[in-house]
Every structure is written in C-alpha cells, then in structure tokens.
Amino acid sequence: MGTHRDSFDQRINHTLIIAMGIFALLFVYYALDFGVRGLSQDLSEETHLFTANTPLPNTAIFTHMLAGALITFLAPLQLFTPLRRRYPALHRASGYLFFTSAIFTAIAGLSFIAVNQTIGGPVMDIAFALYGLCVLVCSVQTVRFARARDFVTHREWALRIFVLAMGSWLYRMQYGVWFAVMGDTGIGENFSGPFDYFQDFAFFVPYLLGVEVYIRHQRAGRSLLPIHVTRGLSISAIILLGLGSYAFAPVFLA
Ligand code: HEM
C-alpha cells in the first residue's frame, strides 16, 4: 500500500514538474523572440528597454532575455528525477550550462538596474536586485556542493535555484491569474498599484520561504503536510498555471 501510494505521489510530483516545463515554454518562446529581435533590429519604437545608439546596454538586456529563456527551459529538466537518474552526464553538462546562463542573466539584469533603473521605480529596483543576488548565491552554492559530492546539500540548493529560475515566469503567471479573476484592480501605471508592489517580491520570496520550510522538515525526517493536502496543492497549482498561461498567452504569442 505504502509503495503504491508513494508511486502515485511521485507521479503527481512529476506531473507538476512536467506541467511547469510545458506551460513555461510560452514564456521561453516570448523571451527568445524578444531577445533575438532586440539584438538584430531597432526596437526603440516598441520598448523602453531598447535605447537607440547604445549598443552595450542593448546587448546586455537582450542577451539577458536569451540566457533567462535558457534557464527557464533547463530548470524543470534538471529537477526531473527520471531524466537525472537515467542520464547523469547530461544532468552535469546541462547543469554547467544552466550555471553559466544563470550567472550571466543575473549580472546583466543587475547591471541594467544599476545603469537604467527599472520601469517600476525604487521598490522594483530593490526587489529585482535582491532577486538577482539570490540567483547568484544559489547558482554558486548548487554547483559548489555538487562538485564537493555533497548531494544532500546540493539538492537543497538546487530546489532554491529551481524556484528562482522559474520566478520570472511565475511573475507573469501570477499576473495572468490576477487579470483573469480581478481584472486591472490594484494595477497602476508603470507598475505603481498595490498589486504591482506586492508582485515585486511575491514571485520569489514566498517560494523561497516555502522551500526553506520544506527543507527543514525533510532534515528532521518529517513530512511537511498531510499527503492529501500535498496532492490538493499540486493539482490546484496545475489548474492555476493553466489559467495563468491562458490569460497571458496573447502577450507571449503577440
Ligand atoms: C537573474 C535575475 C534577474 C534579474 C535581476 C532580472 C532583471 C531584469 C530587469 C531589470 C529587466 C528590465 C525591467 C524593466 O525595467 O522593464 C528585465 C527584463 C526582462 N527579463 Fe529579467 N531578470 C532576471 C531573470 C530573468 C529570467 C530568469 C528571465 C527568463 C526568461 C528573464 C527575462 C526577462 C524578459 C523577457 C525581460 C523583458 C520584460 C518585458 O518587457 O516583457 N529575466 N529583467
């Protein structure tokens, strides 16, 4: 009975990771397309992120989108246990690719904040800079513990970098669900509404805290939540991500 239940719950976990990987492809496509166009065309009419005749900042922010797309794509693959077990060499190689891209994404994003500031003002500057620093620290720690062959600690840091890598996409998903349910209530011009300020931090801080609580329970050999609650949460997450993807699809595919 235990084994049957374990494999059922493993399947739910795998389904959540696969659903995240598939839903996130829309954002991966959006970021790749935006990045390639920003590197090859003049987008000054289309976005404040492009400034005519300043090749360096333009290259930084649009390459940032390409590298960001890569880590969003790779993160679910890195976490997916069957793939990792079956192809450990692939996990290692794509781990280094992920690491290099994550460091680049973060440094380019942080440089953009330092030079141009974000569209949302000081609160967004602080939140996104904190996010970038978390990405840097967690990427380094994940690789460091893998190289030291301390796989228990490696897995803990890998969970932290996973939620961070998916954070930029989760940011859009949370807007998508909010739009679908609340319309534009709480949303202000240039991200100055109460929901925008909440969002500045809500796409990574709660997930990091959730991972922290989970890790502490695992270390103590306790499971965090009753099994039916975990199942319910996983299924609700898949439904919400479907709703967020549906609401955001017109933006991603425009
Ligand atoms: C590593 C931490 C990251 C930092 C510090 C960061 C920072 C930034 C900043 C400051 C901007 C410009 C915001 C503005 O003023 O409009 C931006 C834009 C963008 N970033 Fe990141 N970012 C990070 C991770 C990611 C990731 C993982 C992706 C995944 C694809 C990503 C994709 C994008 C895209 C697509 C834009 C353009 C937004 C739009 O106008 O649609 N970023 N990022």
Image: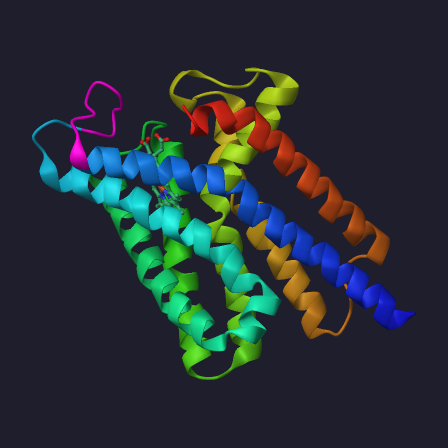
- Identify the residue at image location x=53%, y=56%: 76
Quadrant location, ligand no. 1: top left
Q: Quadrant of residue 121?
A: top left
Residue 195 sits inside the magenta stretch = no
> Would residue 118 be found to the left or right of residue 60 on screen?
right
> Would residue 43 be found to the left or right of residue 227 on screen?
left
- Quadrant that contains the C terminus: top left
Compared to residue 202, the image places residue 14 above or below, namely below
- Identify the residue at image location x=83%, y=57%: 227
Q: How is the image coloured?
A: rainbow
- Identify the residue at image location x=67%, y=61%: 214
Q: How many marks?
A: 0
Q: Position of residue 124 (x, y in %)?
A: 39, 34
Q: Quadrant of residue 182?
A: top right
Residue 48 sits inside the magenta stretch = yes
Compared to residue 108, the image places residue 214 above or below, namely below
- Residue stretch in magenta: 40-50
Q: Position of residue 137 (x, y in %)?
A: 39, 62
Q: Is residue 20 visible?
A: yes
Compared to residue 150, the image places residue 3 above or below, namely above
Compared to residue 249, the image places residue 162 above or below, namely below
Q: Is residue 226 visible?
A: no
Q: Main secondary structure of the magenta part?
A: loop
Q: Position of residue 174 (x, y in %)?
A: 57, 33
> Would residue 8 be found to the left or right of residue 125 on screen?
right
Given residues 84 and 100, the one toward you in this image is 84
